[in-house]
Image (cartoon, coloured by chain):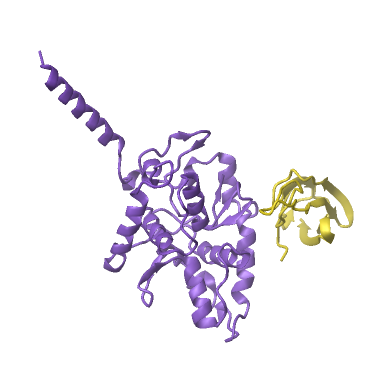
Amino acid sequence: MVRALINVPTRAKRGDIIEIKTLISHPMESGYRVGTNGTKIPRDIIHRFVCTYNGDEIFRAELSPAIAANPFISFFTVATESGSFGFEWTGDNGFAASERADITIE
Amino acid sequence: MIGGRWRWCLLGAMAFAVIVAAQAGEIPAKDRRSDYELMSPELRQMQDDDTVNPGMLWVLDGEALWQRKEGSTAKSCADCHDGAAASMKGVAARYPAIDAKLGQPIDLEGRINRCRTLHQGAPPLAFESQDLLALTAYVARQSKGLPIDISGDESAARFIDAGRSIFERRQGQLNLSCAQCHDDNWGKKLAGATVPQGHPNGYPVYRLEWQSLGSLQRRLRNCLFGMRAEPFNYGAPEMNELELFLAWRARGLAIEAPAVRP
């Protein structure tokens, strides 16, 4: 089960700088560790995160094996219009998760 | 002028007094503090903000599991207990508790598994499995902020004493007891880390070293391994006694589950 926690203010004034926080459950297995039987544990990481604001990409991150499990990503943007934020994580072994959060501009 | 023999006796007595002073014994209530207070401001912030605390991912999961029908009776936790916010409030603060039928202390994980086998007709969940941690975190979370309330009444006293004797017993190749670090030397440094008082008020905790949520039993096994002692098995009676003693020792401290620890 993939779980994600998103924190976006539900209301903001036009022009406000708002913080967006995202947290997603993922093992972020680096690919450099060995298991108890001596075999290498294959890499399994999220390698890309994208945030869109009403369809336009506003933030993107490339993730690497050195990033810890359950990656937390936070960033800022300017509240311009009412609408929704889309969040997408893609990773190894066909991992894909997406979330949505709505915002109203006063 | 004191004679030679007397001088040695006096030195001996002084050395004895120093040793006694070093063995501080039980931490008085006024000095009892959560391991939270030894953490960096960044880590505290991580624990306090529900959208940043990774333990909340398990709580979310537990919330879903609470509603899921399980076992031969096809009952969910909610079918008997309704909403956890009301029915589970304060429960974690009273655990480990003495199970009347078993006549033994049982921790929250143990209670959840007893409930599964007795009332849901489902197999017990494995220790440290995602589902058991999630349900425990969800139940423990409902008591956040409430003080640990272990009465230490007659039925529990025997097991608290047993737990205390494990806590104070030297064991392992390093010949250490739990008390030597967590009663006598808390607040001092062990390499780069501050020795905490070792209270169980945040479990299950998200431990950065584990990059995962983990139970108190996992933490205790970790500590025993570090002492180069043979760790107790998951679910062993000694585990439950030690957990009960630790909860009694931390009585009055607020529950922080799911806490974040380094």
B223 relative to A28 in the view: left or right: left
Q: Quadrant of residue A92?
A: bottom right
Chain identifier, colour purple: B
Q: Nearer the viewer, residue B38 or B239?
A: B239
For chain A, the rendered hue is yellow
Residue found at x 30% / y 39%: B23
Residue A73, given in percent of the width and then of the height, sits at 73, 48
**Residue A82 visible in image:** no
Q: Where is residue B83 shown, x and y percent of the image?
A: 54, 75
Which percent across, then down, holds residue B22?
Answer: 31, 35
Q: Quadrant of the C terminus of chain B?
A: top right
Q: Is residue B35 left or right of residue A105?
A: left
Of residue B121 and residue B146, the one placed in the foreground of this image is B121
Q: Is residue B132 above or below residue A105?
A: below
Q: Quick one: which residue is furthest to the top in this view?
A: B1
Q: Position of residue A4 (x, y in %)?
A: 71, 59
* Image quadrant occupied by the N terminus of chain B: top left
